[in-house]
Amino acid sequence: MAMDVAGYSRTRGLLAHAVLCAGLVFMLGPIVVIIASSTHLTSTLQQQGLQWLPSNQAIQNYGRIFSYEAGFTDQITPLGMLKNSLIIATSVAALTTILSLLTAYAIVFFRMPGKHVVFWFVLVTLLFPLESRFVNTFSVTASLGLINTHVGMVLPVLAAALGTLFFRQYFLTLPKELIEAASLDGAGPFRFLKDIVIPLSFSRAGAIFVIAFMIGWNQYLWPLMISTDDSLYTLVRGIRLVGQESGPGMALIVITILPPFLLLLVFQRWFFRSLAD
Amino acid sequence: MSKVQLTNVRKTYPNGAEAVRGVDMEIDSGEFIVFVGPSGCGKSTLLRMVAGLESITEGQIQIDDRMINDVSPADRDVAMVFQNYALYPHMTVRGNMSYGLKNRGMPKEEINQKVTEAAKMLRIADFLDRQPNQLSGGQRQRVAMGRAIVREPKVFLFDEPLSNLDAKLRVQMRIEIKRLQRRMNVTSIYVTHDQTEAMTLADRLAVINDGKIEQMGTPIDLYNNPATLFVASFIGSPQVNLLPATFDGQHLVSGDVKLPGFTDLPTSTDLVLGIRPDELHLDDNGQFPMRVDIVEQHGSDNLIYGGILGAINEGDEETEFCFKAGQDMLPELESTLKLGFNAERAMVFNKESGERLR
């Protein structure tokens, strides 16, 4: 009997591992190809396509990419793009986290008429991604004079229903006695937020920060629409300028995926804990 | 040392549900008052109205002659202990206990001194730097009490504080709460559905039913002289034995059971006879033939349960009595005992209104 159970779980274990390995290959394959290709000569890539195995051109490729100048009048370098990307992604991440935390706080802890309606409106925005409201958003942004600015690239992506939903679900699990105890302890809405809610939400805020950072970092279409000034290029857009089938281009792609990856590494403990709870 | 006064206090929810229907009460300085009643009777709502966590629809609540209806919970000078402790999970024990004082702008040294003092009193001084999730249920409960104590409030409010503890700890903490309250002499209101807790803790007990005070008095007074059928059946463990009956002018009659010794009762009304389990005794001439169903041995005494033969029954079930006897009384199951009682000590209620008739 015991043998049967053990045998059953071993087949299941093997099967599970096989599925996981397949997934791993599927997801890591492209990254391996990019990293390996970034160490080849541009001519190799153009003649033989992308490469699975590394070569010896890493130093040249990575060295050259930082001195590369692109744009109509060469006004942008990869370092400039990195700076733009960091400014936009960090602003999106920080502001989204703060905004969705405050929205959820208001929706959950305050008694106000129509707050459920407000919450449903927030949720409905999930059905309308930025791309579906480009025209309106563009005209609003233009009328605010935010064309060709970082603010213009950041503002429209801030209203993230996902973060609000995420914080709301968490706040709903907090016992209502907590706010009652705090109010007896002389903590008003601001102190309750500062002393109780924010410290308790820290790991969750970390997760939202990472997700929002990715959203801000990976933006392509919106920055493309809103900027005509080449000095506002982000890394994700800059890849196109350098060229995908060149060694330095591949190196730029590697540099582009690195910051979100490092961020995830730093935050991963909080990230997974808060998603698993 | 503070008096609390409730005058015609009412709570009606926006949907029309009435949780509290006109409560008048005067609580003396240093008194320990227990609100007891079944769940949903409004006892917690009433307590939360004193705390300021529920608005007052009508009436007045005063602490030391100061009307507090519209005063915020923080400024009422009350402290509350919650059933689920409601400790701040990310703060240490010290942080939890000092938070209320810090918000009131008390100097750090004074806070430290008060926290240390209270922690010693509650025997949690060794845990001051731990977080709530590293403590047992009993320790968390002590921290919750510590948080209330350091505030030195005018009134302590307890909302079923022992319900989440296991039976043994509950008894221990019950004694400790009583001792603390005696020592600090702070006016206290304690809500519970557990009548043993209520009986043992209270200076005075308020039995609440359906949003109203059914009866208020010392525990022993309520036990001996319940004003209504509800109070009689709620107070006392094991529960009072109840027998539906009518009065024929000389006897209380319940089916074949005829009980002498009663006078001055209405003849045309349905009545209920109430006899405490310890008021029954073995008697060869006893009027109650009881078929033994279950014997519970509690150590010092045995509780013998069984149906009363021939009595009127409600529905299909026989009217069941509980007889409290000594530990050597071990009748055979299904045997029949003859039980007598002292008519002087028995209670009679109007079945319809619940009012006590004698």
Image (spheres, coloured by chain):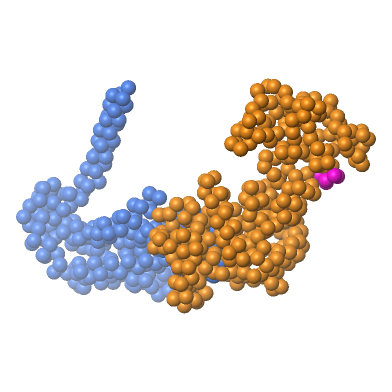
Chain colours: A blue, B orange
Q: Specify the quadrant that holds the N terminus of chain A.
A: top left
Query: Which of the 4 image quarters holds residue B264?
Result: top right
Residue at the (80%, 25%) spot, across then down: B310
Direction from residue B334 to residue B112 in the image, left or right: left
Direction from residue A166 to residue B247 in the image, left or right: right
| Residue B56 spot, x, y in % from top left | 69, 63
Above or below B103: residue A39: above
Is residue B356 on the magenta stretch? yes
Residue at the (30%, 30%) spot, across then down: A9
As drawn, the residue found furthest toward the right would be B249
Residue at the (23%, 40%) spot, across then down: A21
| Residue B3 spot, x, y in % from top left | 69, 68
Above or below B315: residue B144: below
Residue at the (41%, 71%) spot, across then down: A142
- The residue nearer to you, when weighing A17 against B299, is B299
Direction from residue B22 to residue B175 in the image, left or right: left
| Residue A135 spot, x, y in % from top left | 42, 62
- The residue nearer to you, when weighing B86 against A69, is B86
Q: How many marks?
A: 0
Is residue B116 on the magenta stretch? no
| Residue A277 spot, x, y in % from top left | 40, 50
- The residue nearer to you, when weighing B54 against A254, is B54
Stretch in magenta: B352-358
Evaluate whether residue B342 shows in this view.
yes
Evaluate whether residue B212 shows in this view.
no
Chief secondary structure of the magenta span?
loop
Query: Which of the 4 image quarters holds residue A130?
Result: bottom left
As drawn, the residue found furthest toward the left would be A56
